[in-house]
Image: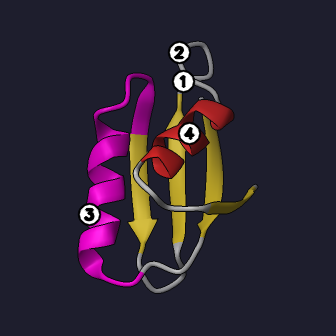
Amino acid sequence: MATKTYKLETLTCPSCMAKIEGALKKTEGIEKSEVLFNSSKAKVTFDESVVNAEDIKDVIERLGYRVLKVK
C-alpha cells in the first residue's frame, strides 16, 4: 500500500469535495480516500499493484479539478 497527498486547485464548495471523494471510492485499487475542503487536499491510500499515483491524478482531473502537486 502507498499513500499520496494531492494538492488541488482551490475547492469552492463542499459538493466539490464530495464529487472527488465519490469518484475516488469507485476507483479500483483505492483503499481509502479523504478530501479536505479547507486545505484543498486529497489523501489517498491505494494498492500500487492495481492503480498508480498518475492514474489517481487522472481521475481527479477528469472531474474538472486541477492537481497542483503530488506528494
Q: Nearer the viewer, mark 4 or mark 3?
A: 4
Classify mark 2: residues with Cα within 10 Å, few (<14), some (14-19) or many (20+): few
Numbered disc 4: secondary structure: helix
Q: Earlier in the sequence, mark 4 or mark 1?
A: 1
Numbered disc 3: secondary structure: helix
- Residue 28 in magenta? yes
Query: Residue 8 appears at what percent x and percent y?
Result: 58, 68
Q: Which residue is mark 2?
A: 50
Whether the residues at callouts 1 and 2 have beta carbons within 8 Å, the answer is yes
Query: Residue 26 appears at what percent x and percent y?
Result: 28, 34
Q: Which residue is mark 3?
A: 18
What's the distance in space between the residues labelled 4 and 1, CA to CA?
16 Å
Q: Quadrant of the N terminus?
A: top right
Q: Earlier in the sequence, mark 1 or mark 3?
A: 3
What's the distance in space between the residues labelled 1 and 3, CA to CA?
22 Å
The amino acid pointed to by label 2 is Val
Magenta span of residues: 12-31
Q: Nearer the viewer, mark 1 or mark 2?
A: 2
Give left or right: position of 47 versus 24: right
Numbered disc 1: secondary structure: loop
Q: Which residue is mark 4?
A: 58
